[in-house]
Image (cartoon, rainbow, N blue to C red):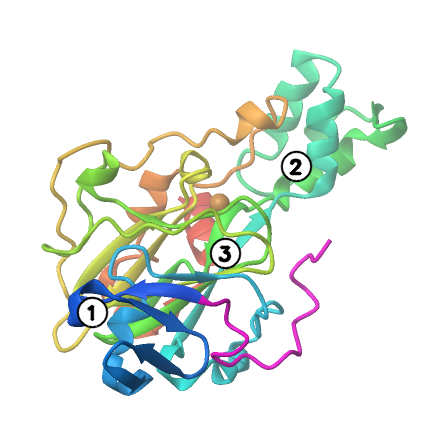
Amino acid sequence: MNNGEGGDERELTFDTIPRRTVLKATGGGVGLSLGTGSVAAASGERTVEQVGIKNYVDPVFGFAAMGPNPCASGDDSCLERFPEQIRPSALIGMHIGIPGLLFGVAESGVPSDQTTATINAAVADGSLSGDQLPGGAVTVGGDRVPIRAIAGALVDTVGFHFDPAGLLVSPGDLVLFNAASPDHGVAAFHEQHGRQNRVPDGVGPLSSPLVPVGGFWIAHFETEGVYDLYCPPHGVFGMVVRVVVWDGDVPDLSVENTGRPPEEENALPSILAGLDPNVPSSAEALESEALDPANIVSRGEVGWHEVVEEHRAG
Ligand SMILES: [Cu+2]
């Protein structure tokens, strides 16, 4: 399985981007085939520049593709390998920061509520206070694992996350969302997703497909303002990201209470056999100082680890 670490050396051109039909208003909605660096229409050949970026990157559904993905390794220089017409200005990775040991514990089960409670108490502040831990071991997947190792894995957990978690771009920029691990997607907090509106007025309900490992999704950020986005499978585990589109003053975060707000609780313990990593909920992440729009504007990008550290310090 491609774990997203190996990169992809194949050249990315319009010939290697999966062919697709793009419906365009001109020519009475004829299908335009994207695949050769030019677009064949009933009226003749058109260049990418003539057709314009909006025909490649939908304002709501963006542009999704499987490989070749120059950014499978997560290296920023990979962006230069995208065709100029759809070259993103920045990369956001979609990650699972949960040690495999904890998934093993979740499958095997910890032996008692008392042990779970003790481990949780010992790691509650995000560091490990070992004198609170029992010295024994539990069986995980057939192996004996020290309680201390489980507690250490819990402290290392940063959960499901986007990285960077805060990003500044300019109006008109494209942003690449890279699937470093499976089962992620991107959606805007928007009333048409049943959520609070947390995107600039007039912006649609941005929505990616579920992005497979090795695939990518590109979003087009045209309107100045603050965009709060979540991963649909993992929003309940705190997986959110804030993109600030700036062209002058720091934009205001506008929130209309049109639907469900970001989650107040992080549901990770429910899938980790009751073990409780000290990671922020969606609401806590979006209310953090690290993701304050002014901080994102001054910093350019803010890493997820900063959001977690602020949460633990608080
Ligand atoms: Cu996710």
Q: Position of residue 200 (x, y in %)?
A: 14, 56
Q: Is residue 162 visible?
A: yes
- In this view, the residue in front, 5 or 27, is 27
Q: Given contact means CB atoms under 8 Å apart, are the residues at marks 3 and 1 in contact?
A: no
Helix, strand or loop under label 1:
loop
Identity, as a three-letter code, of the amino acid under mark 2: Ser
Q: Position of residue 270 (x, y in %)?
A: 54, 23
Q: Quadrant of residue 179?
A: bottom right
Q: Quadrant of residue 28?
A: bottom left
Instruction: Classify residue 64 as left or right of residue 225.
Output: right
Q: Which residue is mark 1?
A: 222
Q: Sequence order check: which comes first, mark 1 or mark 2?
A: 2
- Mark nearest the camera among 1 and 2 is 1
Q: Position of residue 94 (x, y in %)?
A: 51, 55
Report if residue 162 lies within the magenta region: no
Give the residues drawn in magenta, as a range: 1-19
Instruction: State the residue at coordinates (18%, 39%).
Output: 191
Instruction: Classify residue 68 as left or right of residue 187.
Output: right
Q: Which residue is mark 3?
A: 305
Identity, as a three-letter code, of the amino acid under mark 1: Glu
Chief SS of the magenta region? loop
Real-space Cα separation, disc 3 to disc 1, in angstroms: 28 Å
Real-space Cα separation, disc 3 to disc 2, in angstroms: 21 Å
Q: Position of residue 27 (x, y in %)?
A: 18, 71
Is the residue marked 2 within 8 Å of ligand 1, measured from its CB?
A: no
Q: Sequence order check: which comes first, mark 3 or mark 1?
A: 1
Report if residue 2 lies within the magenta region: yes
Q: Which residue is mark 2?
A: 129
Instruction: State the residue at coordinates (57%, 70%).
Output: 69
Crowding near the residue tagged with mark 3, few <14, some 14–19, many ≥20 C-alpha atoms within 10 Å: some
- Number of numbered discs on residues: 3
Instruction: State the residue at coordinates (53%, 82%).
Output: 77
